[in-house]
Image: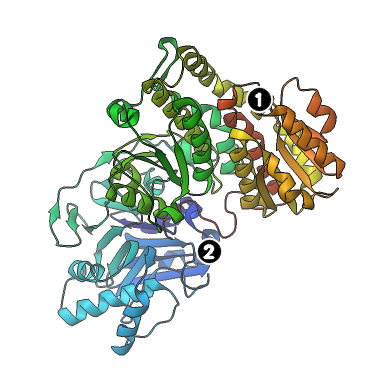
Amino acid sequence: MCGIIGYLGYREAYPILINGLKKLEYRGYDSSGIAIFYENGYNLYKTKGKVDELEKKISSCKNQIKGTTGIGHTRWATHGIPDDINAHPHVSNSNELILIHNGIIENYHAIKIILLKNGFTFKSKTDTEVLVNLIEYIQKKNKLSLEEAVRVSLNEVIGAYSIAIVEKSHPERIVIAKLGSPLALGINEREFFIASDPIPFIDYTKNALYLKDGEMAILRKDKELDLRKIIDNHKLNPIIKELQINLQQIEKGEYKYFMLKEIYEQPKTILDTLRGRLLIADGVICIDGIESNKDVFINARCITIVACGTSWHASLIGEYLLEELARVPVEVEYASEFRYRNPIIEKRDIVIVISQSGETADTIAALKLAKKKGAFVFGICNVVGSSIARNVDAGAYTHAGPEIGVASTKAFTAQITVLVLLALKIGKHRSAITNSRYKYLCQELGSIPDKVSMTLKMDETIKKISKVYHRINNFLYLGRGINFPVALEGALKLKEISYIHAEGYPAAEMKHGPIALIDENMPVVIIATKKGCYDKIIGNIEEIKARKGKIIAIVNEGDIQVRMLADHVIHVPKIPEELSPLVTVIPLQLLAYQIAFIRGENVDQPRNLAKSVTVE
């Protein structure tokens, strides 16, 4: 989950590294550091805290960090507390090798014992310092080049990594390698850019290569890229692609935080996800990954959806959609649980894996397990060229664009949009949905971007509600049917960015325990749209009011009954129940944002979290 960056070329490295680290902070911001290399030497700076702290530390000595080779790191702590010593880059005992690392070396303790016996000492508590000293030990013992020492060493480690390493005496060369953790390489004439994702180097080049698992590259000044297999040193032909990202997508513009910008982008991102797939006039949904595997979906015994976090909540909505519209049995699994048990998966089964980044470690492991058991694996992710995109049998991109805010918003609605399209398409192939219902839902799906735009106009109302409740320490979120997962997602958003304890429940389950918590100090956010057991939800609201609970209700325009009972109402447009999560989640995203903003929290960088969970 850390962010790594590197540069080798003819420009001054420092501005590229420091600005790149700022763009990578969504991956971790416990500590940061850089190393800039010059002939036979380097300057190394690292500190606890965010990249701004690193920049302040360096500001008084900028003239001393001239150099056109450099590596940098922003950390999400796994081994060792966030402090200056545990921050990257890490240096070998001889001060000859300097390494940055994203991932976890699982057998680092056993390696460390061997190195201690051979006279090595350690300053930090990290697995990364063990790795850099292992490389030095193998290099000196066997008199190897740096690239060969890296290759041999990586064949000895167990775990996940993306690394970049430089040898002090050879600053004209950087060696990089990947297994399990993402690593992108930007390529220009006479220069290379290294990063955990392409965002830091999009200003400089759109020519990029994503390293695959088990690959390493030797980068040399004024030389062509040398790409190899780690296991056997087999030389590979690099496949360089043009990135489809523009700078506007990764700038905040008029917004104070990326999260708010991304909430407001949802009409466009939903439209982008529909574009070319939903042809309303023709009553056609086009998804190549289903069309080219039609028999697989028609004959599926069952579908298992595997994901983590917000993507897991989208998966629960997908379960409702696929069972209702396609009439196929669906199970939803946490990727972290699925991978460590022996799930019953057969060759006629489909496993759908969902991940915004396409690099979620547990989801990738679940994907591999599903394929090993013979299932057909379909991927839904947002990042072109990601590990999940490369390893599934078929899939669909969400086209949400880069999502920088740690708390996912637009990726969630884009995932739901894809799941609606899948359910309708599969339902049509399986003859599980009538033509009239299919056409009606396609028509309504096409109206979603406009209805999300209408819902965003409730922001001022939500700000007023947030001012009333921002000091409260506990919330309940309730929903029924397809909107129960939306209640879970709303509670998660509030927890993630405001640090308020919040729990989501099916509304009927309130009587089975949570009702004990309700008093005049407990706000209850309830999704009370007209469809989906509306009369039952009215009963739930009455039960809360009888215990003096405060009601914040998400209701359809024109609702009278709930408005008479609730303390606050937030209106959303009328929409078919199957599509309602696409609008009911918007007020919950805004409520979480506004409460966190009023409390003075850093909305884009909530404590202890990182955007892409690339380690277990």
Checking the image for residue 30, the label placed there is 2
Q: Is residue 536 above or below residue 235?
A: above
Q: Quadrant of the N terminus?
A: bottom left
Q: Secondary structure at mark 1?
A: loop
Q: Is residue 110 left or right of residue 256?
A: left
Q: Position of residue 612 (x, y in %)?
A: 46, 52
Q: Which residue is mark 1?
A: 531
Identify residue type, mark 2: Asp
User: Quadrant of the rendered structure where residue 577 is?
Assistant: top right
User: Which residue lies at the image location 64% right of the left edge and 23% below the top edge?
Assistant: 454
Q: Secondary structure at mark 2?
A: loop
Checking the image for residue 386, the label placed there is none
Q: Is residue 571 above or below residue 214?
A: above
Q: Position of residue 579 (x, y in %)?
A: 56, 26
Q: Is residue 79 above or below residue 563?
A: below
Q: Residues within 10 Å of mark 2 (few under 14, many from 20)?
A: many
Camera-side residue of 4 and 213? 213
Identify residue type, mark 1: Lys
